[in-house]
Image: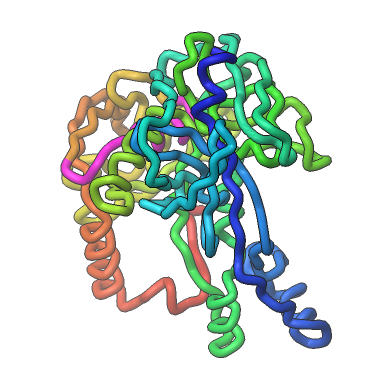
Amino acid sequence: AAAAVPPAVVHIKTTYQGKSSRGGGMDSMLEEFFGFGGGGRVQRQPQAASGSGVILTADGYIVTNNHVVDKADKIEVILSNRRKATARVIGKDPNTDLALIKVDVDNLPFVKMGNSDNVQVGEWVLAVGFPLDLQTTVTAGIVSAKARNIGILNRGNSMMTEEEYDEYRRTGQKPTRTNNSIESFIQTDAAINPGNSGGALVNAAGELVGINAAIASQSGRNEGYGFAIPVNLAKKILEDFKKFGSVKRGYIGVNFVALDADVAEELKIKENTGLYVSDVSPNGAAAAAGIKSGDIIKKVEGIAIYDSPDLQERIGRMSPGDKVALTVLKADGSTKNVNVTLKGESSVMAAKKDTEKATGVSLNKLGATFAPA
C-alpha cells in the first residue's frame, strides 16, 4: 500500500487575491464584539495555501477538501512526476467539506475506492499527503473510532464572509444559516498535520477508505487525533458533482436529539439510545411516513442508531426520491418499521414558507435561530 498509493496523491497549491485589512479603530472593535459565531473575526483568505488531493480516475478527476480550494483564484496541482497542471473546480460542498477538481492530463495513476462501512476500529491504516509543505509523506496508525462528530464544519460556516459583513454593517442584521453539515468522521492516530487536508486514508490493501480533513489539537500540530471523511459518503457527493456540479441532498424533515442517560432523564423517558424526534416538518418526508414528535428513531436500514452521525451519514449518501427504512419506537411503546421517501431542498423550503404563512412569522426576520427546549 505504501508503494502503490503515493503516486496517486497530489500536492495542491492555491493562490488568492489579497484582501486588504479593514484597519483599526471602530471597525476592529465591531469585528471583535459582533463577529458572527461567538466573537469570531471576519473571515479573510490567505494569499497562498496548500493541501493534498487524491486522483480518482486516469483522466484527471481529483478529490480534495472544500477548505483547500474554496474561493481560490488559481489551483495548481503538482503530480508525483513533479509535473504541474492547473485545475478547475467541478463541484464543492462546505456541508461535507468535499470538493472535486479536474486537470486535463491523461493516463494518471489513481487510487481504488474501498468500502468505509467495512473499516473496523483497530484496523491498520495509512495516511498519505503533503504535511507542512513536505514532499509525499506516509504515516501509519489504526482506526481509533468511527462516526465522530466534532462540530468543525458548522463552526467554519459560522464565520462571516466579507459580503455578509458589509451587509451586516448596512442593515444591522447578522446572517442566519441552517446547519446542514454532515460529520461522521473516521478517527485515526496516524499522524496528520496541516497540509494533509484532502489526502488519502487507505487500508492495508491500498484502498481509499477516507479523505483526511481535520485534526484535534491544542498546538496546531498532530496530537494523535486525526479525522477523515468516509469514502462511502464521498462517493455520492462526487457523483453529484460530476452530474450536476452541486449536491442534490435528500431530507427526512425532522429535528432530533441523540439520547443518553442524562437526556432520557430530562425528557422523562426510559429509552437512552436512539434519536428522539423533537419536531417534524409539516409536509416533510417524515410527516408523510407517519413519524411524529416524541417518536424515537432506533434503526436506519436495520442498523442500530446511537448518535446523530449514524443517521446523517446514511441520509447523506441518498438523493431526493430515495427510500430509507427506519425502525421507530412510538410514544405508546410499539415499534414500527417505516419507509421514508426523501424530499429535495425545494420541498423543504416550500414547507418552511407554508409554516411561515400559517403562523405569520418568519424566523429569519427575527434575527435569531431557535431549537426546541
235 drawn magenta: no
Residue at x 55% of width, y 81% of height: 173
Q: Position of residue 141 (x, y in %)?
A: 66, 15
Residue at x 21% of width, y 45% of height: 320
Whether residue 163 is situated above or below residue 186 in the rendered picture = below
Depth check: give the residue in front, 96 or 55: 55
Q: Position of residue 174 (x, y in %)?
A: 56, 75
Tell me: 34 left or right of 102.
right
Q: What span is in magenta? A: 306-321
Tell me: 361 left or right of 145.
left
315 drawn magenta: yes
Depth check: give the residue in front, 148 or 233: 233
Residue at x 36% of width, y 76% of height: 361
The answer to whether residue 287 shows anywhere in this view is yes
Whether residue 347 is situated above or below residue 236 in the rendered picture = below
Whether residue 359 is situated above or below residue 75 in the rendered picture = below
Depth check: give the residue in front, 4 or 327: 4
Q: Position of residue 325 (x, y in %)?
A: 23, 28
Res 262 quadrant in image: top right
The answer to whether residue 252 shows anywhere in this view is no
Res 207 quadrant in image: top left
Considering every residue shown, the one lying at the far bottom of the view is 170
Counting labels gives 0
Q: Position of residue 343 (x, y in %)?
A: 21, 49
Image quarter in which the N terminus is found: top right
Tell me: 339 left or right of 205.
left
Depth check: give the residue in front, 184 or 301: 184
Residue at x 53% of width, y 9% of height: 204
